[in-house]
Image: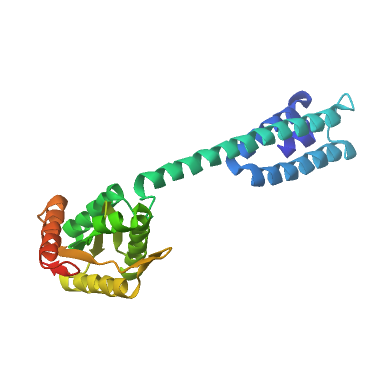
Amino acid sequence: MLYLVVTGGAEGTGPIWIFIVSPVTYSIRGLKRGTFDIFIFLLAIMLGFYCADMFNIYEYKPAQFPYRIVFSFIIVALLTGFYEQSREKYSNKIIALSQRNERLATIDPLTELPNRRHAMNKLSEFKKEHAYKGIPFVLLLADVDNFKKINDKYGHNFGDEALIHLAKIFKKNIPQNAVASRWGGEEFLIAIPNVSVAEGVNVADKIHDSLKKAAVSLRTNTVNLTISIGVVQSEENRSIDLDIKHADQQLYKAKEQGKNRTCSA
């Protein structure tokens, strides 16, 4: 491009090609880097016109032609820059909106835990790893004991606070590679890959201990939550739904045996 400016190209039409630089540069480099590149290019073009005149390489006619070309290029570059700024701003809004919708679709807004849909996707991934790599996973299905009574006695705001509190306890006590999700209402599902049932029970025991030490408080009301947990290990030839059904059976057994405990199979 600089060569066309210095030599004039075909009958002095070479500099016309510089007008494609700004749209192409912005589309490839973006607003910030593109603006910097175009500024450097503009300096190079001005230097090219100067060299063409100084060293008699090419004589542009009329003499004002180089100035008009540079001025026109600046206007085109500015307009293209404003367009790129608007496009980038709009694109960022679309991305932010998409991320927000994705979050709403996969995260429970109250507890900020993954919701049932997201949990099922993760369980599918764990199931594939179990099938292809032989890496099993353990399911912990937990339910808040006497949650309806807590809601009726202290109100729904307290019930919401209790669920938020429980979600924090889960996050604090599960391994990094585990997924804790709100399965529905006051029921939660935790999936832990590459552990045994005994290790899953240990995680459940840690959760029980944390709940004993940390009560839920809202205004003047304070309650120590208890939960019942069913623990099972996934089986390679068993569907996710059946794995969850077996965990639910262990949860039901924990409820029958007096609540605030863990049952496993």
Nearer to me, 57 or 117 = 117
Quadrant position of residue 199? bottom left
Q: Residue at x 74, y 43 (%)?
A: 39
From the image, which quarter does the N terminus lie in? top right
Q: How many labels does the image show?
A: 0
Residue 9 shows in the view: no
Is 39 left or right of 196, judged from the image as shown?
right
Quadrant position of residue 173? bottom left
Nearer to me, 53 or 70 = 70
Q: Position of residue 169 (x, y in %)?
A: 34, 67
Q: Position of residue 137 (x, y in %)?
A: 20, 63
Q: Where is residue 105 in the image (x, y as percent from the top left)?
A: 36, 44
Residue 182 shows in the view: yes
Is 237 left or right of 165, judged from the image as shown?
left
Q: Which residue is drawn at 65% across and 33% down?
A: 83
Q: Which colour scheme is used?
A: rainbow
Nearer to me, 216 or 16 = 216
Quadrant position of residue 197? bottom left
Q: Which residue is drawn at 64% across and 38% down?
A: 85
**In the image, residue 67 above or below residue 173:** above
Nearer to me, 72 or 8 = 72
From the image, which quarter does the C terminus lie in? bottom left
Q: Which residue is drawn at 73% across and 34% down?
A: 78
Q: Position of residue 160 (x, y in %)?
A: 36, 55
**In the image, residue 1 above or below residue 207:** above
